Amino acid sequence: MKENIPITDVKPGMLLAKAITNDKDMTLCAEGTPLTEDLIDRFLQMEIDSICIESNKEMSQEEYLALKEKIEKRFVASYNSNSLLGKIKIALLGHLESHKGSS
């Protein structure tokens, strides 16, 4: 999951989920970059208030059910588990399940 958080809450090792660009749309730091203390300090110097990071935060039951329903609607029931689309559906549902909260 992607999560926008204040730069003051960013910790080394977090992954950047969205590229950081300047006002001319030049990429300053690419999506997927592992954040270091030096990068975080540089962002603070650049007066960047928040960034989008990859999060392992668990989702609520409501969020889980809504996303599961979207996946089910996008993949027609006629796709069997051996077809490519069937395998993609199974992978998506498995990934979704791994982020589901315990409630």
Image (cartoon, rainbow, N blue to C red):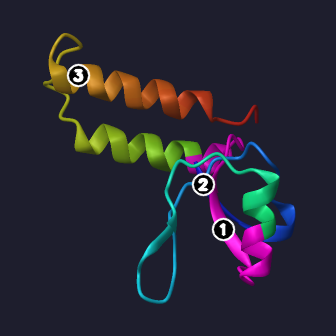
Of label 3 and label 1, which has the lower sequence position? 1
Mark 3 crowdedness (10 Å alpha carbons): few <14, some 14-19, many ≥20: some
Task: Please indicate whether residue 1 sits to the left or right of residue 91 in the image.
Answer: right
Residue depicted at 17% across the width and 21% down the height = 84
- Find disc 1 in the rendering and name its residue: 51
Mark 2–mark 1 Cα distance, whole angstroms, equals 8 Å
> Is 29 in front, or is 54?
29
- Find disc 3 in the rendering and name its residue: 86
Marks 3 and 1 in Cβ contact (< 8 Å): no
Mark 1 crowdedness (10 Å alpha carbons): few <14, some 14-19, many ≥20: some
Residue 6 visible in this rendered orientation of the protein: no
Q: Is residue 83 one of those drawn in magenta?
A: no
- Find disc 2 in the rendering and name its residue: 16
Q: Secondary structure at mark 1?
A: strand
Residue depicted at 71% across the width and 46% down the height = 14
> Is 96 in front, or is 15?
15
Which disc is residue 90 wearing?
A: none
